[in-house]
Amino acid sequence: MLTPLEKAGILVEALPYIKKFYGKTVVIKYGGHAMINSDLKQAVMTDLVLMKFVGINPVVVHGGGPEITGMLKRLGVDSRFVGGLRVTDEVTMEVVEMVLGKINKEIASLINGLGGRGVGLSGKDANLLTAVKKLGSDRQDIGFVGEVKEVNPSLLETVINEGYIPVVSPVGVGQGGQSYNINADYAASAIATALKADKLIILTDVEGILEDRNNKESLISTVKIDDISTLTERGVLQGGMIPKVECCVNAIKGGVNSTHILDGRVPHSILLEVFTDKGIGTMVVP
Amino acid sequence: MLTPLEKAGILVEALPYIKKFYGKTVVIKYGGHAMINSDLKQAVMTDLVLMKFVGINPVVVHGGGPEITGMLKRLGVDSRFVGGLRVTDEVTMEVVEMVLGKINKEIASLINGLGGRGVGLSGKDANLLTAVKKLGSDRQDIGFVGEVKEVNPSLLETVINEGYIPVVSPVGVGQGGQSYNINADYAASAIATALKADKLIILTDVEGILEDRNNKESLISTVKIDDISTLTERGVLQGGMIPKVECCVNAIKGGVNSTHILDGRVPHSILLEVFTDKGIGTMVVP
Amino acid sequence: MLTPLEKAGILVEALPYIKKFYGKTVVIKYGGHAMINSDLKQAVMTDLVLMKFVGINPVVVHGGGPEITGMLKRLGVDSRFVGGLRVTDEVTMEVVEMVLGKINKEIASLINGLGGRGVGLSGKDANLLTAVKKLGSDRQDIGFVGEVKEVNPSLLETVINEGYIPVVSPVGVGQGGQSYNINADYAASAIATALKADKLIILTDVEGILEDRNNKESLISTVKIDDISTLTERGVLQGGMIPKVECCVNAIKGGVNSTHILDGRVPHSILLEVFTDKGIGTMVVP
Amino acid sequence: MLTPLEKAGILVEALPYIKKFYGKTVVIKYGGHAMINSDLKQAVMTDLVLMKFVGINPVVVHGGGPEITGMLKRLGVDSRFVGGLRVTDEVTMEVVEMVLGKINKEIASLINGLGGRGVGLSGKDANLLTAVKKLGSDRQDIGFVGEVKEVNPSLLETVINEGYIPVVSPVGVGQGGQSYNINADYAASAIATALKADKLIILTDVEGILEDRNNKESLISTVKIDDISTLTERGVLQGGMIPKVECCVNAIKGGVNSTHILDGRVPHSILLEVFTDKGIGTMVVP
Amino acid sequence: MLTPLEKAGILVEALPYIKKFYGKTVVIKYGGHAMINSDLKQAVMTDLVLMKFVGINPVVVHGGGPEITGMLKRLGVDSRFVGGLRVTDEVTMEVVEMVLGKINKEIASLINGLGGRGVGLSGKDANLLTAVKKLGSDRQDIGFVGEVKEVNPSLLETVINEGYIPVVSPVGVGQGGQSYNINADYAASAIATALKADKLIILTDVEGILEDRNNKESLISTVKIDDISTLTERGVLQGGMIPKVECCVNAIKGGVNSTHILDGRVPHSILLEVFTDKGIGTMVVP
Amino acid sequence: MLTPLEKAGILVEALPYIKKFYGKTVVIKYGGHAMINSDLKQAVMTDLVLMKFVGINPVVVHGGGPEITGMLKRLGVDSRFVGGLRVTDEVTMEVVEMVLGKINKEIASLINGLGGRGVGLSGKDANLLTAVKKLGSDRQDIGFVGEVKEVNPSLLETVINEGYIPVVSPVGVGQGGQSYNINADYAASAIATALKADKLIILTDVEGILEDRNNKESLISTVKIDDISTLTERGVLQGGMIPKVECCVNAIKGGVNSTHILDGRVPHSILLEVFTDKGIGTMVVP
């Protein structure tokens, strides 16, 4: 049990980080276990609210794959994936929007419950995310899967400046008002760039980039974007980690100061990343 | 075919109404046929965008009953009503949120498609609508049906002042973050009061209040709130019209200048109400 | 007789134009029949007020030749013209100022009567229009006829932003406070440039530029500024049309988006030009 | 010849007055000799500009009787007065507006020439002065002579706050846009009240109120409004001084701090009144 | 050694307090050991900077008794006290100002060294603290000892709103510009009232109010202002504690929400008071 | 004895200068006799307050050499100078800070007494003046003598814009918070540059630069910076004047419009310089 003084000491230790990020914007891709486990969820929300109160501006971009799959199942619709991307026909798109919309407002509501002021937005609000159709890796048609064409950040800027924490559901809008299902990592990366964010944090269900994927001690703390290709060639980067790293690289090239692939299974991993010098996960830097 | 000059004349006729409502807020309860029929939908959206451009601030509160019933059916869940209110168990509440969320962003997106800037919000955003549990007419438990406890209008005011058209889904938030299904008419009435709106417009699927419900020519154009009780006693007010009129009365008592029950099946009924002197539907006034 | 719905349709048709010109400035040179005929006058004023209410910023620059001539006659002073310019001795200059001043406030007052907020200014207010002496076409002295040296738009910007419609009388101020009689077309063109206006509209008493001046059907709808010299060579441009076209060209070169020579004898010609796609008169464009 | 140090001493002596009136509004009725004599005119303008630069907000309301009479004569129209008021038929009203308009812009221009920023307004601009018909002393019809019904000060406030010196011509607007000829003293008094001015200064062609009108040494420096009736009874107040004193009393009752009847024939009388403790003329106080 | 997660937990524990005091003003009387001991000094400064970064507005009012005595000694001047107040002749007053001025800027500089933005002010700046002469307890003359007559908080409000931490030296200004030596506790109390502060914290060199002054375990955590007289009668309040409690009572009566007498010898006592629920010292409340 | 009219004439003469410097910043190095003689002191303060009221923004940077020497003497510490710079050991630095701090607040208080709003700042406030150690002319260690490394003008800008007159004591802050004694002339020059001041005025105890130092009539009114080296070569510039001229040159090169070496023994020399065309002292220009 800590003495009050020891507690004070810990608050004091956070001061340099609070100063460093004061007034900065941090975009967080929120997904995976951290969105399913109730304690982790509460911890992430607390981190967001705490950040806002100490002068940092968090923006949340969330996914929702498992819940989408669950709802499709209840409706008797099969989920089909091509190269990691959900094939999105009209019925599926409808379910994607419904499920993401529900998750979106739930996150905003959790933020409100902790004393923050969350606002749930989708890429369709004020044309926040315009999208174009994306083809599968072999250029096959995979339906209403989109990639970000343009981010219109003014609605986000308005709500951030008025003290709200925006929560963004990665549904984009294309020609004729058509909805598109956008990968949340890519949406977060594009939004971080458009907002000239200081940090992009991607919560995942792994420790970060491991030199040896069988050895959790082999975490690579920092990677420069110029060294990414070597890591790919050496096979260190594989599977789902490749697009996440690509999102980091895009954000860095777009002017974001640092990007982070964090283990969302660790409680308060965002807080630890931002407020302590013991970086966790892998940081991708220029 | 009109000559250009005749067209100009009609624009000029609208000028007194534009002046009259310049800078005022108009809350519109949107539902029924006007939300299902594609042409009517487009007409309503156009009316909203036009109002915004000529200096009036529309706020939309929408329902979604038929689509909720449809989705429940697809999920094999029965819809049950008590005294006109949907009995809302946990599964139903989840579906209500999902379906209303989808409709909500679709409306915002239609507004955007016409050159406005729509933002889809729910009562859960920034605690916009806090709610308490509502019992059925015989005080039975009907689940997560709520009534408005408080409206926190600052998020709406922020987006209105920044030039957006807010679209509100009537899901409220209660103790412990519980979601509540709120009747859209009541939500619209409470929001109109909180925003000190000039007008509340309720779109319905009837002509307005008919003196003789079998005679469409018997429309009552204007009712004073003090005469409502007489209408009820005489049996003129019945069924679904009663709560709508109650919403109007509440809004008037809350300071709203005029309230209108309009026939949403007539294209551009909002525009006609606001921009011509030929009032349509029934107006409830102090 | 139009049905309400047909009327609504016409308002809706105006929406794209309202959107297009929202927040833009339009400078109108007002003169000729439109300033003498009482119905036309009322129509022009209505057009201005309507524009202001739907978010467009009109600025009026007016002439007053016939009324000046009339007053000079009452005072027993002859009006003399050289190359279309009024020879302006001291007595004439005094009358010019008096008559234009009276017209100026009358226009402002008409705007006020229609619910707008008009403010009558002259080029002498806050040095709005500074002037230098202009010689006649053969370099003879024609008295206090001036050309615009500089426009100081800050007073105009102040009143525009505060919601007023400025009405400008084209009297400029030169060295030692000397007043100068400036041609209203040139003043309007210079003001449009200084305000970075979107449009300059010159009301005249002809249909526009006619290919064949005896054939009103031969109206040229659009001319590029590069094609002006050809029109002049071919004799299509003659007489009083030449300086008006020059004003258009100057404004276009100064950054104004489009310029229009309209027939002021057509009621609501400004409204028709701005709010319908059926352009009337001749448009001069880059 | 003063030494520089003596000059500095005089600037320093003005400091307490500059402090006292910093940010205050002073309304000046400008007329009589001070408007005709070229040196006096220049001195008044200098006083206005100096006041503005040291943080005081002057507002000028001017007359123009002699110039109106002159112009009427040139047009062959007789000037007729009833009880000191000009009988104003339609032709006369037109001339009043023209002449006052010219004087108005000339004053603004003189201010500009001295480095200030003058703006010439009439009571018709933005409905600054609305008027109703005033009858003669025996209730006979004297034409378009008006009295102030209402002052709409927002245009004045806008230009004052933006650093301009407003110059107001006392032409009011009545029903149907009819122009009315308003006495400049009354207009100044009404404007001082509406602007919550600190001071009202009326420039006249006499020393102030004289106890014995044949003895210029018998100037009454200060009069309380409660003592006015005694002065009238004793015959000290007579003729043209009576309405001027009435204007002072109205302004004092309307909340103006002090009012002054000054001798406009003394150069820089305004400056002397404001910046020295040696009051000149007669001050009317609560 | 704490794990990162335990550290995060402690930051999270502070969140409710950060929310509670967000945007509030806290006035701190700084003196005693906390101002002499170098580690304590650093700890206090850190607490101030941390508070500012998390949205709380600290204002420091400091003493300097021991350093004043030291400097007087170096100058060969005896320090004399009457009833706890320093007899302040002209030479002493000069030394008081010099020493407090040096301490004042040193505190500001320490704040700057930690990343805050400190501004050292005295009661003489912009007449922040006007003072009148205070007599000794037996009404004898004790020189330039003053009590606060008025607080002019606008300078403080300006610097607080611009993000600075004001540090105030309790030197007041009286008639004719005479400096007065004001007790820092009273100055802090008056400033807290004038700023409508949420909290007044007085750092002392004791634990707080002890029921039994020989027993440090007998700390009284909370006292209502109505119970103060009983404590005095019972002899619990004695000596230097009496004026400190009086300052608290004055502040509470002036509208300050809570006041605290804290042990400045405990490192980070301010932080502990503000950010933990384990109040330390004695709180005086309404 | 002047007549009121003659007084008015002198105020009017100041108008062109008031216009010229309206809204400009003037930095004044205040020291020497003008700071010791009580009448001169009062005159300087009056000049500052008058400037502020007529729209000019004065900033004072003061010295305090004689008072520092006096206090050191009272403490039995010898003052030692190397090349005109005070050798500043730790004890001396402490005394410098104390004495300058007292003078600083006294100046602010005098300004307040005249109706201005003075704020006393040191270079340590908000890191206004950061410093590095300066060596003696032969590169020997002369203790805590500093030169300006950087000026952080935002605190000055804040207080200037809010209507205060800042008074700056030239104590800088270096590494680790160490205080440095900075020459006031150099501090004033650096501040003038950082504030983009229009003028730098250095008050001295001589007439200005004399062609022949034994002939007070040989004052050089204006020197271009390119001619300084010639003056030095010819021996016209000697001793204490050299660094003052260097400060002027630095300011001119830094963008200040004009710099002035004035005789502080002449009452109101600042006023005379700013408000009359009879420049006094020597002006150094580009």
Image (cartoon, coloured by chain):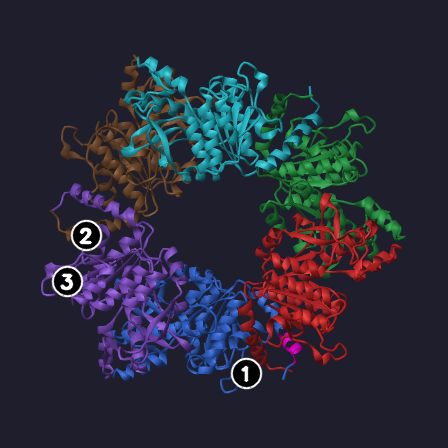
Chain colours: A purple, B blue, C red, D green, E brown, F cyan
Distance of label 2 from label 3 (alpha carbons): 24 Å
**Residue D130 is at least partly visible in this image:** no
Q: Which residue is rendered at x = 64% and y = 57% of the image? A: C191
Amino acid type assigned to the residue bearing label 2 in the image: Ala
Q: Is residue E239 left or right of residue D82?
A: left
Span highlighted in magenta in the image: B3-10
Of the pair A211 and C118, the residue shown nearer to us:
A211
Does dot 1 land on a helix, a strand or a loop? helix
Q: Identify residue for label 2.
A: E8
| Number of numbered tags placed on the structure image | 3
**Residue F174 is at least partly visible in this image:** yes
- Crowding near the residue tagged with mark 2, few <14, some 14–19, many ≥20 C-alpha atoms within 10 Å: many
**Is residue E244 covered in magenta?**
no
Amino acid type assigned to the residue bearing label 1 in the image: Ser
Q: Which chain letter goes with mark 3?
A: A
- Asked if the residues shown at circle 3 and circle 1 are in contact, with their CB atoms under 8 angstroms apart, the answer is no
Q: Where residue C1 sits: x, y (%)? A: 65, 82
Q: Which chain letter goes with mark 2?
A: E
Q: Identify residue for label 1.
A: B218
Residues at marks 1 and 2 on the same chain: no
Q: Where residue C275 sits: x, y (%)? A: 60, 72
Distance of label 3 from label 1 (alpha carbons): 78 Å
